[in-house]
């Protein structure tokens, strides 16, 4: 029986950083679903826009908690590693325009 692929470990994150990354990716996922260059129907985009609003509020609240706790620095190198492990590059790619079709 084949073993599932082994993913690289997540870097060590505080609970607040983990929540920040998780909520950020939720926002990215919803924006990707709203992207008119990649979507198929208005209902999917509408549902994603509704979810985006609540995820954005949760992201704002998570960042506010971090700031109040004195976590004023974003460790971008570490958080970028976490985003890559969590498939952030592919997920963020849905936010961009698709490649231009050949002429």
Image (tube, helix red, strand yellow):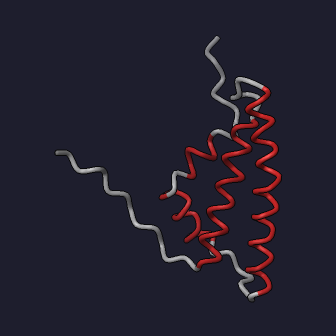
Quadrant in the picture for the C terminus = top right
Residue 39 lies left or right of residue 50; in this view the side is left
Residue lying farthest bottom? 70
> Where in the figure is residue 42, as x and y percent of width and height?
79, 27
Quadrant in the picture for the N terminus = top left
Q: How many marks?
A: 0
> Where in the figure is residue 62, as x and y percent of width and height?
74, 72
Picture residue at 56% right of the left edge, 59% below the top? 83
Q: Nearer the viewer, residue 1 or 8?
A: 1
Residue 78 lies left or right of residue 46; in this view the side is left
Residue 18 lies left or right of residue 34; in this view the side is left
> Where in the figure is residue 19, as x and y percent of width and height?
64, 69
Residue 86 lies left or right of residue 26; in this view the side is left
Q: Nearer the viewer, residue 7 or 3?
A: 3
Picture residue at 54% right of the left edge, 76% below the top? 13
Against 5, residue 33 (above or below) is above
Picture residue at 78% right of the left edge, 49% below the top? 52
Residue lying farthest left? 1
Picture residue at 49% right of the left edge, 77% below the top? 12
> Where in the figure is residue 65, as x and y percent of width and height?
76, 79
Q: Quadrant of residue 69?
A: bottom right
């Amino acid at each position: 029986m084949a073993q599932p692929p082994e993913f690289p470990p997540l870097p060590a994150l505080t609970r607040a950083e983990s929540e920040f990354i998780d909520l950020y990716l939720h926002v990215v996922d919803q924006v990707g679903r709203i992207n008119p260059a990649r979507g198929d129907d208005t209902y999917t985009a509408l549902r994603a826009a509704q979810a985006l609003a609540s995820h954005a509020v949760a992201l704002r609240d998570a960042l506010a908690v971090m700031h109040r706790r004195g976590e004023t620095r974003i460790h971008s190198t570490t958080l970028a590693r976490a985003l890559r492990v969590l498939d952030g590059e592919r997920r963020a790619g849905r936010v961009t325009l698709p490649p231009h079709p050949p002429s």
